[in-house]
Amino acid sequence: MKRRRFLAATAGTGLAAGTPLSGRLLKPHRPGLPMPLRSAAPLPRPYQVPLPIPAVLRPVRSDATTDHYEITQQVAHLRILPGLETEAWTYDGSYPGPTLVSRSGRRTVVTHRNELPQPVAVHLHGGHTPHDSDGHPTDLILPVGWSRRHRYAMADTSGLARTALGERTYTYPLDQRAATLWYHDHRMGFTGPSAYRGLAGFHLVHDDEEERLPLPRGERDIPLMITDRSFTADGSFHYPAVDPEWGMPGVTHHWMEGVLGDTILVNGAPWPVLDVRRQRYRLRLLNAANSRILRLELDPQPPGGDALVQIGADGGLLERPVRHDALAMAPAERFDVVVDFARYRPGTRVRLVNRLGSGTTAEVMRFDVSGAARAPVDDTAVPDRLSTVERLDPRRAMAVRTFYFRRTAAGWTINGMPYRPGRALAAPKLGTTELWRIVSDFHHPIHVHLNPFQVVARDGGAPGRYDAGWKDTVDVLPGKSAEIAVRFTDYSGRFLFHCHNLEHEDMAMMADFVTR
């Protein structure tokens, strides 16, 4: 929507609140961008190991309404690089953690036990979740055996934090559409190093609408968690923390813009290979990197292009499929795509590449297409219509707010303020829709907790090519803006919105909002 039309549409409501929409764009923040951290350990040649598929976690018990799970957060020593062990922080000993699979409308209850040496918090990213199970970064789980003599970095003086010793139970009603969600650590000031060490996993939600569609499923429905890491000479994860003892959050000066690794991992393996038949596959793509932006393509492209048929976004199915030659993905974004490998000649080796990378970070993984001359029967398809997506009307917004994400003398800030727990920058009323205008000086992927949103405009014009459907993370380029419509529903309490460049988040680019 053009800016003039939008202002005219909202002027008559008499309900606009917060910073006016007419605020000017920020000048782009143009520091010297960091080079990837160079690994001291020898890196393997790409395409030497098979793609791991995270195990699906089984509930410890189930009843008529609820599935109960237990996860232990623990140190594990993993074989990521040849001949070396990498100490990782894991969910149940694996990286990524085990995949949870749930049914829309059926409650999932997960008890996390913390046997790591530091506090943690668990956020179900994309979950429509009550505030006491949202994984607010000050709602910590202290390690088993923690006592008053131990110290940890904690700057919450609001009195609102809920700290548990040893374990915490999270309740997820999952009153939401089928979608590719993920769970990860969200501890205040230390999300970046915690996630870098391995605290991330998939949580998939299914529903009747999705299952009525003839989409690929079973072994041809594959979650792909893409990250980048660097390694020290002994195989340890290399992360430039300003304080390796975890007494102070943040990274050293050269990586304040974000930490970039030189090794691409997919499901925890470096540049893996997947053998595929000449059939359609559903790939659930997740950019779980701390700060790396991806532009993914298949090389070679199939005849006619449009290799990546997008069927879903962060918040579930699109209304109609969108065909892409390439996908731009900021940290935390998910794209569900269907790839028809029958479009390739038998025996073709198809690389998934990152056009924004160079050297080792330009390669992601490879698909080796079956050499069988005749493609097997494939009863799947991508329908022209996938779902009905309700469109939020920005003219009915009960409030219009502008949030400036920028680097100031105070560090990474929102509206000039670093994060302070308990200071809410918005107080949406449940049942109402608000229009949030996000203005950026740098490349900031902005994530909103509690409810998904729709991107209704960029820079006063139309949404972008990758903005279709329900989103929970929007990528905003330097010196640009995005307008999102959010309808807040169901749960009152304290929630967050923040930059999902994890180094920016840890260095205070977060804010609370309170629903009522």
Image: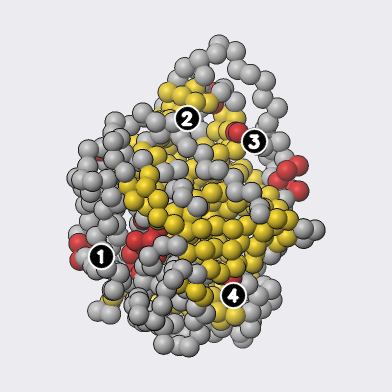
Residue at the spot 44% in from the left edge and 71% down from the top edge: 145
The residue singled out by tag 4 in the image is 132
Q: What's the residue type where badge 3 is placed?
A: Gly
Q: Is mark 2 on a helix, strand or loop?
A: strand
Instruction: Kindly check if marks 1 and 4 are in contact, taking CB atoms under 8 A apart as contact.
Output: no
Q: Is mark 1 on a helix, strand or loop?
A: loop
Q: Of callouts 3 and 1, which one flags the residue occurring earlier in the amino acid sequence? A: 3
Q: Nearer the viewer, residue 161 or 324?
A: 161
Q: Quadrant for residue 361, please give it.
A: top left
Q: Of callouts 1 and 2, which one flags the residue occurring earlier in the amino acid sequence? A: 1
Quarter containing the C terminus: bottom right
Q: x%, y% of residue 434?
A: 59, 75
The residue singled out by tag 3 in the image is 218
Residue 38 vs residue 501: left or right? left
Mark 4 or 2, which is nearer the eye? 4
Q: How crowded is mark 1: few (under 14 residues within 10 Å), some or many (20 or more)?
A: few
Residue at the spot 45% in from the left edge and 88% down from the top edge: 158
Q: Residues within 10 Å of mark 4 (few under 14, many from 20)?
A: some
Q: x%, y% of residue 45?
A: 29, 31
Residue at the spot 51% in from the left edge and 58% down from the top edge: 72
Q: x%, y% of residue 227?
A: 39, 48
Q: What's the residue type where badge 2 is placed?
A: Leu
Residue 63 vs residue 160: left or right? right
Q: Residues within 10 Å of mark 2 (few under 14, many from 20)?
A: some
Give the CA separation, mark 1 to mark 4.
30 Å
Q: Of callouts 1 and 4, which one flags the residue occurring earlier in the amino acid sequence? A: 4
Label placed on residue 244: 1
Q: What's the residue type where badge 4 is placed?
A: Asp
Q: What's the residue type where badge 1 is placed?
A: Pro
Residue at the spot 41% in from the left edge and 87% down from the top edge: 157
Give the CA separation, mark 2 to mark 3.
15 Å
Q: x%, y% of residue 448?
A: 52, 68
